[in-house]
Amino acid sequence: MPSGRVHNLINIAAYSVLAAATLVASRQELVSVTSVQALNFTLAYAAGTFLLSPDLDLAEGRVDSKRHWGILGVLWVPYGMMFSHRGLSHTWILGPLTRLAYLAVMVALVVGLLSYVVPTLKLPALSGSLDVAVLAPFALGYYLSQWLHLIADGVRPDHGLRRGYRKLDQSGLSRMGRSLTGKPGRARAGRSRRR
Ligand SMILES: [Zn+2]
């Protein structure tokens, strides 16, 4: 299984090829991509590669994508406890959504806490319309970055569908329980070595 660094290199290489191909294709007027669309795609792709990698399911240990969050990396520890490595987190459709949903909950908690502590705080409102032309490049960039990771891991698109999703499964929740009670868990021991 590739390490976080190798995953990053694969994604960077794929991005370079795609960017070059898109540039050539748009020169020849085969495709038309606006600079805003290209930027949105790139931002989502970079976020998916460096900040929201499927290997955050190892965030209770040391993992590349957690390190990129700096001090905020600690916010991903519960995610690592909830999701077993290469379980639901490594599925093609739902896996990437679990990280977005988790991030949304974390942002909501931080915003909630901030507005409780500083009631006069004015938060910037989300502006602009969220139509397909805006959302599609984000979704494409994010999902492509995730799928390249899964392909490199050798995870097939029907992963989890054949056996049923094992996670959020009993072992993950009981592992979280064990961590909270401070008891060592057998299941945790070998996990941090795998990526
Ligand atoms: Zn992985």
Image (spheres, rainbow, N blue to C red):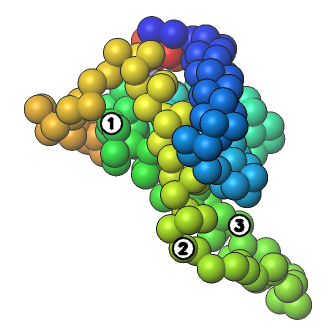
The circle drawn on residue 149 is none
N-terminal of the pair, mark 2 or mark 1, is 1
Disc 3 secondary structure class: helix
Q: Which of the 4 quarters of the picture holds residue 13?
A: top right
- Front tag of 1 and 3: 1
Q: Is residue 129 above or below residue 31?
A: below
Residue 59 horizontal/vertical position (percent): 57, 32
Disc 2/disc 3 C-alpha distance (Å): 27 Å
Q: Which of the 4 quarters of the picture holds residue 29?
A: top right
Instruction: Residue at 49% x, 36% y: name it.
Output: 144
Q: Residue furthest left?
A: 162
Residue 51 horizontal/vertical position (percent): 66, 38
Residue topped by disc 3: 110
Structural crowding at the residue carrying mark 2, measured as other residues with C-alpha within 10 Å and reported as few (<14), some (14–19) or many (≥20): few
N-terminal of the pair, mark 1 or mark 3, is 1
Instruction: Residue at 61% x, 11% y: name it.
Output: 6
- Front tag of 2 and 1: 2
Disc 2 secondary structure class: loop
Disc 2/disc 1 C-alpha distance (Å): 26 Å
Identified by mark 3, the residue type is Val
Instruction: Residue at 57% x, 53% y: name it.
Output: 137
Disc 1/disc 3 C-alpha distance (Å): 28 Å
Disc 1 secondary structure class: loop
Q: In this view, does 10 lie above or below 22?
A: above
Residue topped by disc 2: 131
Residue topped by disc 1: 91
Residue 64 horizontal/vertical position (percent): 66, 24
